[in-house]
């Protein structure tokens, strides 16, 4: 199975699943938080290239990671978000605190 | 096809998180008869996902109970009602405010109702503390195509 | 995931032919939690399609009534019951014989029950003339994978 | 929209849909029968290359066309059936009267 999280330098790349719902958001949160315990990470980068579905559980997960990272002086970034995902990110207002693309 | 323009279905399922995906796929499958755009299907799936997740997390506090969804198609209107018999909402107006959530510890964003409002044409929430909640939603789907010919 | 190994859902819908596809997609979506093979999904879809088509064509003679499907997952066993309240089957054994059909004019092949038997592990048909028919089926799915961990 | 039926000489090629269920079988029957009224057809060839789902309604439709064609001294053939479709054709016994591939 391909790893969901991949550390490159002090960046953590996260491959967001095809459908980012409540179940998947919970799983991503756990995976990312586990990585943050052991490693020095300055930026968590969520790669949405495969993602076609997201609901507000995904927003909660992103906001939660943004809070974690902020406490450690780091940040969160979203890359490769398709049109629909971008629209949802805008709707939710997360673009105010999270860099998109 | 059929010489009518209404069609109705109901699904009822245990409030397991793995049934969230089942619920939205079932609703999406039911609406294909309206020749929806991909965007419209995604809108319906998101709205259903929000309402079902709320029933699981908020109404039943993750205990296993029944969730029911009633879908009705009348011409090009898709009516969706999501019903739980959980703890109910004391103040519906407040609950519907964007960013309002009673479960920040579970990383809820408080955007569930806001998404339902954004992706559906109409939403009405009927709730009684101790009795449960009904989320009624409506969306016009597949305009420009005629499904029942 | 959940600390249980049963999960249940029920769907009920109008006996329109366009709901045949809805019914089999819904059952397929429900069974994904068992990590089924593509073959197993196709088997379930075929069996559901047969039972639902029979309810529409034979039980209700294409009048619009309700069809109900109950699905239950217990560990790796998928139980499916398709219920109608239509005209019923006077002689179930005879009905289940391959090539037997009472609607050759509609080009029915008489292979519906034979397919359900072929693609599911078990099938039991309970029917009473004037009351309706219940088709109970069971299939072991997703062996070699553990769904509820 | 691509035509379902295409006449080439005295053969009629029929593109079977992705899911050959009760609804689609009824539609195919109508289309093929309409073609048979006007044209001299000796063979109806059902091309299953796109088809991933078939139930016994499809079998009934094939048997019905076989009967129509036999009355006119013609026949029916099935081509490009995938593994699953072949298995269903075998199960149903239609291969006894219909040529497959
Ligand atoms: N079905 C429900 N039963 C009980 N309470 C609910 C239900 N749906 C929503 N709520 C309440 O409304 C609040 C806002 O819901 P929502 O906008 O979906 O945001 P979130 O789910 O992120 O908290 C929830 O935090 C909860 O208190
Ligand atoms: N739900 C039902 N209600 C009433 N009669 C049924 C039902 N299902 C099957 N039958 C009867 O059993 C016969 C055999 O069914 P089946 O093997 O599925 O073949 P087919 O549908 O091609 O006729 C049908 O022709 C019909 O007479």
Image (cartoon, coloured by chain):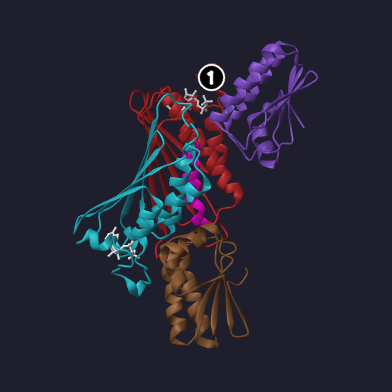
Chain colours: A purple, B red, C cyan, D brown
Is residue B112 in view?
A: yes
Q: Is residue B33 magenta?
A: yes
- What kind of element bears circle 1? helix
Q: Chain of mark 1?
A: B
Left or right relative to C82: residue A81: right
Q: Is residue C125 above or below residue A7?
A: below
Q: Quadrant of ligand 2?
A: bottom left
**Mark 1 crowd level (few <14, some 14–19, many ≥20, 10 Å Cα):** some
- Looking at the magenta stretch, what is its main secondary structure? helix
Spot the residue most to the front.
D96
Left or right relative to C56: residue B148: right
Give the residue drawn at x 45%, y 83%: D70
Q: Is residue B41 magenta?
A: no
Closest to the observer, D31 or C146: C146
Give the residue drawn at x 39%, y 25%: B88
Left or right relative to D62: residue B118: right
Is residue B149 in view?
A: no
Q: Quadrant of residue D17?
A: bottom right
Percent position of residue B39, x then y: 61, 47
Left or right relative to B121: residue D64: left
Q: Which residue is mark 1?
A: B106
Mark 1 near ligand 1 (CB under 8 Å)? no
The number of callouts visible is: 1
| The residue stretch that appears in magenta | B21-34
Percent position of residue D54, x then y: 48, 60
Closest to the observer, D75 or C23: D75
Percent position of residue B8, x then y: 39, 51
Percent position of residue D85, x then y: 51, 61
Q: Is residue B94 above or below residue D17?
A: above
Q: Quadrant of residue D18?
A: bottom right
């Amino acid at each position: 199975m391909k790893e969901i999280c991949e550390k490159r330098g002090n960046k953590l790349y996260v491959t967001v699943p095809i459908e980012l719902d409540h179940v998947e958001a919970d799983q991503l949160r756990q995976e990312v938080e586990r990585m943050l315990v052991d490693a020095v990470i300055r930026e968590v980068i969520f790669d949405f290239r495969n993602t076609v579905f997201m609901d507000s559980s995904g927003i909660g997960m992103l906001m939660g990671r943004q809070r974690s990272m902020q406490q450690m002086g780091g940040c969160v970034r979203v890359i490769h978000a398709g049109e629909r995902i971008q629209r949802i990110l805008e709707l939710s207002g997360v673009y105010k605190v999270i860099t998109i693309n | 096809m059929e010489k009518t323009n209404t069609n109705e279905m109901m699904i009822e399922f245990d409030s397991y998180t793995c049934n969230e995906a089942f619920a939205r796929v079932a609703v999406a499958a039911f609406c294909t008869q309206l020749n929806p755009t991909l965007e419209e299907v995604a809108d319906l799936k998101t709205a259903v996902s929000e309402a079902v997740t709320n029933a699981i997390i908020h109404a039943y506090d993750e205990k296993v109970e029944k969730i029911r969804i009633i879908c009705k198609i009348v011409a090009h209107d898709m009516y969706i009602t999501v019903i739980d018999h959980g703890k109910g909402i004391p103040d519906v107006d407040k609950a519907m405010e964007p960013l309002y959530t009673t479960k920040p510890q579970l990383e809820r964003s408080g955007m569930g109702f806001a998404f339902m409002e954004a992706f559906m044409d109409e939403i009405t929430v009927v709730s009684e503390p101790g009795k449960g909640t009904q989320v009624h939603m409506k969306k016009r789907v597949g305009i420009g195509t005629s499904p029942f010919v």
